[in-house]
């Protein structure tokens, strides 16, 4: 796979050490979580990651600066290794494209590995901090980063995608939905709830002006989730979306048990 830096000093075969290292580190984080999924079938938002499938820097080339990667798998057979390395490259490109709003929602079919639409979106969400970091090198409209693996379609990071990651459109209308509580940090008032219609968890934030029962009720149903009781709870919330309508996160204003008055 090729990561090509174009524009600015990159056209002379150079990249600022600080900005370039930060950018590559961000892309490396995305590569790690994608490789971990290919190796284990598990989405992990932070390390440690499996070392059974990994991306490595192989060499660099001049022109616009090119960083070539080498994908190595250490699985049960040569055939499994070959499939895993190809799957890792394809999934990396697809997840980056999805996170940047360049492909629509949908399942991805790979060699012996079908990635559900909900999992693609969770991977895209997990990839977002790394992609925000990788965009820091892009400080003018002339600069862009191109990811290619000799396929027809390449993925591009530029000023437009940098702005896309920053953008937030908040729904005007609040909604009510039945969810499971997957994670909660009482101090930061952040967490994750599982949307059964989406088939994935979604990050949330509870503002200070939310109903007083919101955090205690979320906490109670997090325990239910941990105990695998299958219990669900109503939340009143607003969606925050990217410019193309993709769900980014939600704001929860109220949370109450099924059958309780709103």
Image (tube, rainbow, N blue to C red):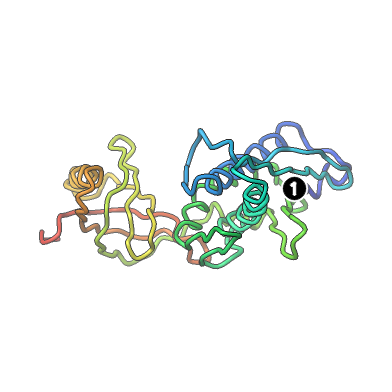
Residue at the limit of the structure toward the front, as seen here: 77
| Residue 62: image location, x then y, percent | 88, 43
Name the side, left or right, on which 72 lies relative to 117.
right
Q: Nearer the viewer, residue 110 or 218?
A: 110
Q: Answer above or below: position of 192 versus 49.
A: below
Name the side, left or right, on which 83 lies relative to 244.
right
Identify the image quadrant of residue 68: top right
| Residue 137: image location, x then y, percent | 70, 42
| Residue 55: image location, x then y, percent | 67, 41
Name the side, left or right, on which 134 lies relative to 44.
right
Please name the residue shown 48% across and 63% down the image. 117
Q: Which residue is the site of mark 1?
A: 3
Please name the residue shown 39% across and 57% down the image. 200
Q: Residues within 10 Å of mark 1 (few under 14, many from 20)?
A: many
Please name the residue shown 38% across and 50% down the image. 203
Is residue 132 in sight in this rendering?
no
Is residue 242 in sight in this rendering?
yes
Q: Answer above or below: position of 174 versus 2.
A: below
Q: Answer above or below: position of 24 versus 34.
A: above
Q: Secondary structure at mark 1?
A: strand
Identify the image quadrant of residue 186: top left
Please name the residue shown 46% across and 53% down the image. 122
Q: Nearer the viewer, residue 89 or 84?
A: 84
Q: Nearer the viewer, residue 196 or 26?
A: 196
Q: Nearer the viewer, residue 173 or 177?
A: 177
| Residue 195: image location, x then y, percent | 33, 59
- For the C terminus, the quadrant is bottom left
């Amino acid at each position: 796979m090729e990561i090509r830096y174009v524009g600015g000093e990159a056209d002379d075969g150079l990249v600022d050490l600080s900005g370039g290292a930060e950018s590559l580190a961000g892309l490396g984080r995305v590569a790690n979580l994608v490789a971990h999924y290919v190796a284990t079938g598990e989405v992990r938002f932070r390390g440690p990651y499996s070392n059974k499938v990994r991306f490595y820097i192989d060499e660099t080339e001049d022109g616009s600066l090119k960083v070539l990667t080498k994908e190595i798998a250490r699985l049960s057979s040569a055939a499994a290794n070959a499939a895993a390395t190809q799957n890792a490259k394809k999934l990396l490109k697809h997840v980056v494209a999805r996170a940047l709003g360049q492909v629509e929602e949908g399942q991805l079919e790979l060699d012996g590995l079908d990635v559900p639409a909900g999992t693609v979106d969770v991977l895209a969400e997990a990839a977002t901090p790394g992609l925000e970091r990788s965009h820091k090198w892009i400080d003018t409209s002339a600069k862009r980063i191109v990811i290619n693996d000799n396929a027809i379609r390449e993925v591009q990071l530029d000023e437009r995608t940098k702005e896309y990651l920053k953008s937030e459109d908040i729904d005007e209308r609040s909604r009510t939905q039945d969810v499971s509580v997957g994670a909660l940090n009482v101090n930061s008032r952040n967490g994750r709830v599982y949307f059964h219609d989406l088939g994935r968890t979604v990050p949330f934030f509870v503002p200070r002006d939310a109903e007083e029962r919101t955090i205690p009720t979320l906490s109670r149903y997090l325990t239910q989730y941990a105990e695998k009781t299958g219990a669900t709870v109503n939340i009143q919330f607003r969606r925050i979306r990217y410019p193309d309508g993709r769900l980014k996160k939600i704001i929860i204003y109220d949370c109450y048990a099924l059958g309780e008055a709103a």
